[in-house]
Image (spheres, rainbow, N blue to C red):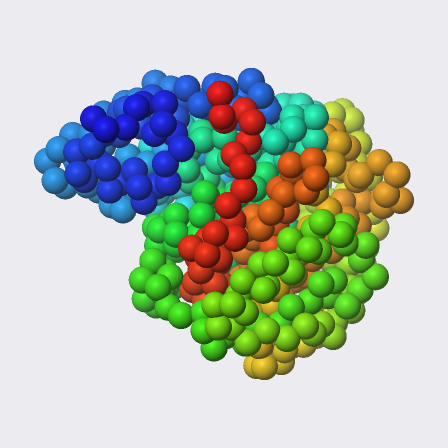
Amino acid sequence: MTTEPTQLADLTAIRLTAGYAAGEFSPVEAVRAVLERAEAAQAATNCFTRIDPDEALSAAKESEERWRAGTPAGPVDGVPVTVKDLILTRGAPTLRGSRTVRAEGPWEEDAPSVARLRESGAVFVGKTTTPEFGWKGVTDSPRHGVTGNPYDPGRTAGGSSGGSAAAVALGAGPLSLGTDGGGSVRIPASFCGIFALKATYGRVPLYPASPFGTLAHVGPMTRDAADAALMMEVICGADWRDWSQLGPSCGSFREGLAGPVSGLRVAYSPSLGWEVPVAPEVAAAVRGAVDTLAGLGASVEEIDPGIADPVEAFHTLWFSGAARVVQHLDDAQRALLDPGLREICEQGARYSALDYLAAVDTRMALGQAMGRFHSAYDLLVTPTEPLTAFEAGVEVPPGSGHTRWTGWTPFTYPFNLTQQPAATLPCGVDGDGMPIGVQLVGARHADALVLRAAHALYEAGTAEIPAPPASRG
């Protein structure tokens, strides 16, 4: 064996499977290393709701036998995976961060993305933390408490897939499944220094249907774009339970990574044309990533897409969905909810059908505007967030003047409304060593193009940032 077990937790999924195939190390060794790191990650950041060592090691032994026989079940056989605690996983409670959910189950069904990973031989390490029902852009809940950032546990990991982002950043599995209804894979990935993709709506089947409707996506959270491409090829498998799925993907996401960036038409928008106070260090790092794309041959123009902030329409749709989530609860159960969630549910319950349809009209107009914009530009590049991670345990940065989480993440939720693919990757750190993310947005169905551009930035070294302190020792 050429790799020490404790180092295996730092390898990508692609490197792990190559090592399995070559006999350098085994799935059992890799999973043991990841379980050790998962326990350390939990102690440092509270990123797990559940760690399953017995199940994981049993699955790893079965994977090891398949690799020895030369018959791996699929491209992620033996790869450790974590799953956000909003996504159904057979045999494990999906508690959704809420004291109103009974743990007893039964938990007998996998969500489509989990089912595809299981069929491919993935090893499930555990479930990761989420705010209650995934309602906000930070990760703390009445049931599981606060999740801290791997770079500074006193700061937020972001949300709502904050547990997944922290787990990946700290080596507790190279792949994680997150969900994104307004930025929920991209926000924490930006804050924690990893990669995440919100694919075109319907590309990754989703079941049960989200109460937030077609704002909600399932997406990969990984160490880099190449691992995300690998994961996409597994989780995009068709599933009849999602009536809005797009069907099988055309072509290989992994093969598409090798395509050129030269000649791509890139629009760089520092603030989407809105009055957003982007931190100077964030702006400089994102500008550096844009310059790298130009250096690789892309045609870059600084231009805004000419859209208005759709936050009120987003609130109408989001808060209405939240009200639907808790509609079945009695007064005693509602008293157990996160106070902020209770507030938006009360607001959502006051909207009329006409209010909802007006928000849908705004959404359709926004989608048309972005479709027109992408007829001239292949990619839109923005900061993922205008700031880096702030104090943990609060919905908005102290002293910011914002009242809801959408106030400080203006670059993410517009692209849930439009259903476009959007990815984030690290492009530097601020003066406190906190990660900065750059967001790449493509036209609907241009998922492979977004992954290709992100991969080119990884290959160029743009995403090289220090590892989190908790993973270095």
- Can you tell which quarter of the image residue 470 is in? top right
Q: Does the rendering let one see residue 49?
A: no
Q: Is residue 161 above or below residue 37?
A: below
Give percent across and percent down for residue 246.
44, 64
Foreground: 148 or 331?
Answer: 148
Q: Is residue 330 above or below residue 444?
A: above
Foreground: 99 or 267?
Answer: 267
Task: Report the residue at 32% width, 36% height from top.
Answer: 79
Horizontal side, residue 10 vs residue 464: left or right: left
Q: Is residue 282 above or below residue 364?
A: above
Q: Does the rendering let one see residue 455?
A: yes
- Can you tell which quarter of the image residue 429 is in? top right
Foreground: 82 or 153?
Answer: 153
Task: Report the residue at 58% width, 50% height from top.
Answer: 427
Horizontal side, residue 450 vs residue 251: left or right: right
Horizontal side, residue 413 vs residue 290: left or right: right
- Can you tell which quarter of the image residue 394 is in? top right
The number of callouts visible is 0
Horizontal side, residue 403 vs residue 152: left or right: right
Task: Report the residue at 79% width, 40% height from top.
Answer: 396
Please identify the quadrant where the N terminus is shown: top left
Give percent across and percent down for residue 17.
26, 40
Task: Report the residue at 80% width, 39% height from top.
Answer: 397
Foreground: 360 or 68?
Answer: 68
Give percent across and percent down for residue 299.
55, 76
Give percent across and percent down for residue 146.
67, 26
Q: Is residue 274 above or below residue 235?
A: below
Farthest-out residue, left: 69
